[in-house]
């Protein structure tokens, strides 16, 4: 079984357990009462003369590298905010990335005005309502694990709850799903899901096919100033970076380097 399928299967089991504790009807009612404090879209939309926007990620581990580093999530968020990150991405997937929904709740409580993206493997409407209750300003939808109809349904549901969507694509087929759903923010993941190799060329190739009115975000493998300079030249709005900041000896300096400041 492919790693992506394993993650999705584990997530299905967790959702089934959550549904036993709180039904979809209960979570729906509560979610509609929660107000969203700020907009992710506005924070990462780059104006013509502006530098690249940075979404800094709270990431404990990955299926490929295992545990990256032990650190205090709130202290890392403090560092992200003080160093000029435009938004924070929080991985909440528990089994393979050692994330937790509680990380997002804590960060949002401390920084209500900083846009926070919930990064997880989302395919069930229950997770959309759950994300709203956690305080997420935006969620990740991964084109590769959804069909066209699911993409459209989940996207429209998320927007109806006043949250934004970062729609992640890996190839032309995923882009087709994104355009079918009518998404406004497209994230290009530079990691090949079959080989797990990373190539920035993926962003350059797919960016050419994306309509000009979409916000484009480059994800995975961005670790140097030269990477960012190339992406900026190609018209990328924002970058999503976790590993290279977390593993840096000076995360604050790494953020400034990637922001080209």
Image (tube, grey):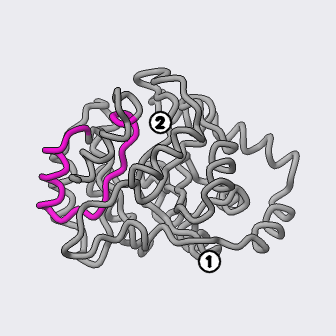
Which residue does the numbered mark 2 point to in the structure image? Answer: 4
Give the magenta range. 223-245
Residue 17 figure quarter: top right
Left or right placement of residue 36 versus residue 89 in this view: right
Residue 224: % across, % down: 20, 39
- The numbered disc on residue 160 is 1
Above or below residue 19? Residue 41 is: below
| Crowd around label 2: few <14 · some 14–19 · many ≥20 (10 Å) | some
Above or below, 65 relative to 180: above
Of residues 53 and 94, the one nearer the viewer is: 53
Q: Position of residue 94 (x, y in %)?
A: 63, 34
Residue 80 drawn at (x, y percent): 45, 47
Q: Secondary structure at mark 1?
A: helix
* The one of 37 and 146 positioned closer to us in this rendering: 37
How far across and how far down the image is residue 116, in percent?
54, 57
Which residue shows up at 58% across the image and 37% down it? 73
Q: Nearer the viewer, residue 88 or 220?
A: 88
Q: Residue at x 32, y 60 (%)?
A: 53
Residue at 51% x, 35% y: name it. Answer: 5
- Pointers 2 and 1 in contact (C-beta within 8 Å): no
């Amino acid at each position: 079984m492919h790693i992506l399928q394993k993650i999705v299967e584990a997530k299905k089991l967790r959702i089934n357990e959550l549904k036993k504790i709180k039904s979809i009807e209960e979570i729906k009612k509560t979610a509609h009462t929660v107000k969203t404090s700020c907009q992710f879209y506005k924070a990462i939309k780059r104006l013509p003369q502006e530098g690249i926007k940075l979404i800094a990620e709270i990431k404990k581990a990955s299926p490929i590298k295992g545990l990256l580093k032990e650190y205090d999530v709130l202290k890392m968020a403090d560092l992200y905010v003080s160093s000029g990150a435009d938004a924070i991405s929080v991985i909440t997937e528990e089994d393979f990335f050692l994330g937790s929904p509680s990380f997002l709740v804590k960060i949002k409580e401390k920084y209500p005005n900083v846009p926070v993206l919930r990064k997880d493997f989302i395919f069930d409407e229950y997770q959309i309502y759950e994300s709203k209750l956690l305080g997420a300003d935006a969620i990740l939808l991964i084109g590769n694990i959804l069909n066209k109809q699911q993409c459209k349904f989940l996207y429209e549901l998320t927007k109806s709850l006043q949250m934004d969507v970062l729609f992640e694509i890996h190839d032309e087929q995923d882009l087709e799903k994104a355009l079918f759903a009518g998404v406004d923010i497209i994230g290009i993941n530079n990691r090949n899901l079959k080989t797990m190799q990373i190539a920035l060329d993926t962003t350059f190739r797919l960016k050419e096919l994306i309509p000009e009115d979409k916000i484009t975000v480059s994800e995975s493998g961005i670790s140097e100033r030269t990477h960012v300079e190339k992406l900026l030249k190609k018209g990328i709005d924002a970058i999503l970076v976790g590993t290279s900041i977390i593993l840096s000896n000076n995360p604050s300096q790494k953020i400034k380097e990637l922001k080209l400041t």
